Image (cartoon, grey):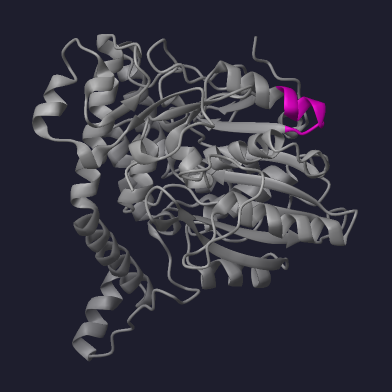
Amino acid sequence: MATGDCNKEFSTDYILLEPEKLNFYELIRILFPGDIEKRKFVDCLEGAESNFERRWIIFISISAQKFLQFVAKPLSWFGSAFETGLNLSSANGGFGMLLLNCLRGNIQWPDKTSPTFSSFNGHLDKRVELDESIKPGDSKYYAALTMMSSKISYENKAFIKTTVEDQWKMEFLGSFDFWNDYQDKATTQAFILHDKTVDSDTIIVTFRGTETFDADAWCTDFDISWYEIPGVGKIHGGFMKALGLQKNLGWPKEIKQDDSHPPVAYYAIREMLRERLQANDQTKFLVTGHSLGAALAILFPAILALHEETWMLERLRGVYTFGQPRVGDPKFGEFTTEQLKEHDIPYFRFVYSNDLVPRLPYDDTALMFKHFGTCLYFNSSYEGKIVAEEPNKNYFSPLMAMPKTLNAMRELIRSFTIARSKGKEYTEGWFLRFFRVLGLIVPGVSAHGPQDYVNSTRLGSPALFLPHHDPTP
């Protein structure tokens, strides 16, 4: 079913992009003045603002989605082959041993469902152990734990289960593929663990971010469609769809799950939390994620507030996001901030250096997206500070091109020295160093990887991780 065929009565205003209706003629026409509601691939109310800047952003968004839909299968095939190659090398003890095993006829073939098979992100940073110097009760404990949880969320179910149970000694409650009602497939992933260590009885819900070779996830990121919910504000449509927005219902408080496909994320996770929290009055929960997962993590309590799930919000220990894109407009930020403050819920938004994702979508008059909450910004020396907004808030700034490239060069050099200065657990391998070379071409890409966020939570000053007042003006 096309987006335009869906019931949108839950929203007072909206702009929805439908790449399946796009043709070349319509794409070119969007760049010229005219009523955008007359474009076949744009569904919006009559009289929607259509200055050139907004039309250009729509052009970029819809073009990217159409391209991603076109290359979805080859991208998936390439990604599968690439990750298999990385694991083939690892399983045989490195490229040299792989060649030797080829000559011997004794190649160790990786199993994609095994607990030893790592994703693209897993090869960038192979650490799975928690930092033993950070104990339960320390101010950095939940930040370090949620970042590691966000990092392993990119792995397969067996890998996550083994890490949680054998490495972290915590209870694994499940890893799930959730249904996206608009993409008609299960494209949202999350896993849940229960930390029962000393001084902690906490369930952690971790949303997975954008997988490198997953075109559907990238389409969610590039989809700048938005809906305005009365009393809440304008929210990124792609993120709402990923969390569980219903085609013909919007955000009803309760739904009947359709047994013909996997459940949708928000309602299924909320039900699992209800059962666990009601079973023990002392249990609380956290939500977290990296990249796309970070957007879903902050959107989750906002929808809980929309549904007046007061008792659940009172059991929410905190929200930790890493490399989070902007999710909504200033009104959405005000609504969510008010709800978090009312229920005394800490919200930490981590941004590392020149990471490009927190600087998207743009914070300008055309898109109206804006960050909110406590921003913990870390430079390339992992020195952190609390700011209202990360420096260079919109990524594509000509004035910052040279400084960003120089910083990427510094990060590449640091990859050869950090093990000596910080310890062997910070050693960076050849694959991560190659990834940092790509950062010289597109500064901010390598800065979005999980490794620098893990380092920031481990090396940052403990004082930064205490609850703070929102510095947003």
Residue 388 against residue 180 in the figure, above or below: above
Residue 111 against residue 237 in the figure, above or below: below
* Image-based side of 341 in relation to 129, left or right: right
Dividing the picture into quadrants, the one containing residue 24 is: top left
* Image-based side of 114 in relation to 473, left or right: left
Q: Among all residues in the image, which is located at the extreme bottom? A: 105
Place of residue 472 in the rendered image (x, y in percent of width and height, measured from the top left) = 64, 14
* Image-based side of 203 in relation to 393, left or right: right
Q: Among all residues in the image, which is located at the extreme right? A: 281
Name the residue at 27% across, 77% down.
Answer: 98
Q: Is residue 442 visible?
A: yes
Taking depth in this image into account, of 250 and 124 the one nearest to the observer is 250
Residue 37 against residue 63 in the figure, above or below: above
* 341 falls in the magenta region: yes
Q: Quadrant of the C terminus?
A: top right
Name the residue at 9% across, 28% down.
Answer: 25
Taking depth in this image into account, of 345 and 41 the one nearest to the observer is 41
Taking depth in this image into account, of 90 and 390 the one nearest to the observer is 390
Q: Is residue 418 visible?
A: no
Q: Which residues are magenta?
A: 338-346
Place of residue 305 in the rendered image (x, y in percent of width and height, measured from the top left) = 71, 34
Q: Among all residues in the image, which is located at the extreme left? A: 25
Name the residue at 30% across, 50% down.
Answer: 215
Dividing the picture into quadrants, the one containing residue 173 is: bottom right
Dividing the picture into quadrants, the one containing residue 23 is: top left
User: Looking at the image, how many numbered discs can be counted on the residues?
Assistant: 0
* 65 falls in the magenta region: no
Place of residue 80 in the rendered image (x, y in percent of width and height, measured from the top left) = 29, 65
Place of residue 237 in the rendered image (x, y in percent of width and height, measured from the top left) = 44, 34
